[in-house]
Amino acid sequence: MIKSTSVDQPAMAYRPPYSELHIYYMEGRVPDQTLTDSPTFIGTWEEDGFSFVFFSAEAEADVAALLQQHPHLTLIDRYQMPYEEWQGGHLSAFRAGRFHVRLPWEIKDADRQSAPKLVGEIPLLLDPGVVFGNGAHPTTRDCLAAMEMHYRDTVPDTVLDLGTGTGILAVASAGLGSRRILAVDFNRLATQTARHNILLNGFERRVLPVHGRAEQLVNCSAELMVANIHFDVMQDILRSPGFRAKRGWILSGLLRSEAREAEALIARAGGHIIKRWTRDQIWYTYLGHNDPALVGGD
């Protein structure tokens, strides 16, 4: 369970969320609201019929009870690791263009309001929990760069963020001035984490986290669509009427082997790529727009 904390609470109340993780890998879906009474339960990450159940301490008794109550679940393996190892290394604040992304547990009371800021800097707080999307991945950095470029010309009032993860891109769009953002993820733990980060940044009136499938919610009306997502889902998005109806878009999460097919689907939908970002010729990110005739013109 992700515990929400108001942005107005003292920063010194924060600590790194977990010193270590105990992860139980199971076949089957863990029912909602299960284990929420356990003080060390963090949440469940579901993927293709399998579940990763996270605890902040050893939880053999809780897991044994869970398996007894739900015979459809099968324990496959268990892991124990430091929290930062799960996150891919030491977490620290970083700057990406105008964005200054900081970890809430590193902020002291004194510098929450008084820390020097660069001209035009957009400060963001990010608590990744156990969800992927701590800002270190090159696709996240390139999406932030693409957002800055798009917002120089126009500030979209409405944004659709598909595959929101920790919610970092949805929060960034609010920081850039958008007023109505829908942050979508099919993973419940990601949706909870995004909600937590939305509250940390005080954007709960602008950003709405939603649990749902990107392929279905792509039809929601928005001036800008951001999708940093697996290619198997991206293909469905690019073939949908909802994509063709978007005025602007940022697409990422694409490997080199997928980029050519993605570009063909973009062209077939009437899209025009404005700029490409590549990292080590592995990861691809696109900023573009669709034919104005398809979105009703100006």
Image (cartoon, rainbow, N blue to C red):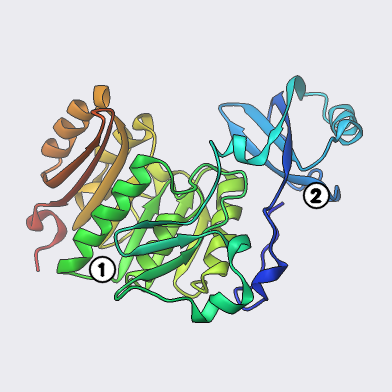
**What type is the residue that disc 2 sits on?**
Thr
What crowding class fits label 1: few (fewer than 14 Cα within 10 Å), some (14-19), or many (20 or more)? many
Please provide percent x and percent y for residue 191: 56, 52
Residue 74, located in which quarter of the rendered image? top right
Residue position for label 1: 156
Please provide percent x and percent y for residue 101: 45, 60
Residue position for label 2: 36
Query: Along the line of sight, which residue is nearer the eye, 177 or 32?
Result: 177
Name the residue rendered at 9%, 58% in the picture.
292
**Is residue 104 shown to the viewer in this render?**
yes
Where is 143 relative to 100, above or below? above
Where is 10 relative to 128, above or below? below
Q: Residue 292 vs residue 59: left or right?
A: left
Q: How many angstroms separate mark 2 from mark 1 (CA)?
A: 38 Å
Query: Along the line of sight, which residue is nearer the eye, 184 or 142?
Result: 142
Residue 106, located in which quarter of the rendered image? bottom right
Instruction: Determine the secondary structure under disc 2.
Output: loop
Query: Along the line of sight, which residue is nearer the eye, 148 or 225?
Result: 148
Please provide percent x and percent y for residue 258: 26, 26
Query: Along the line of sight, which residue is nearer the eye, 2 or 162?
Result: 2
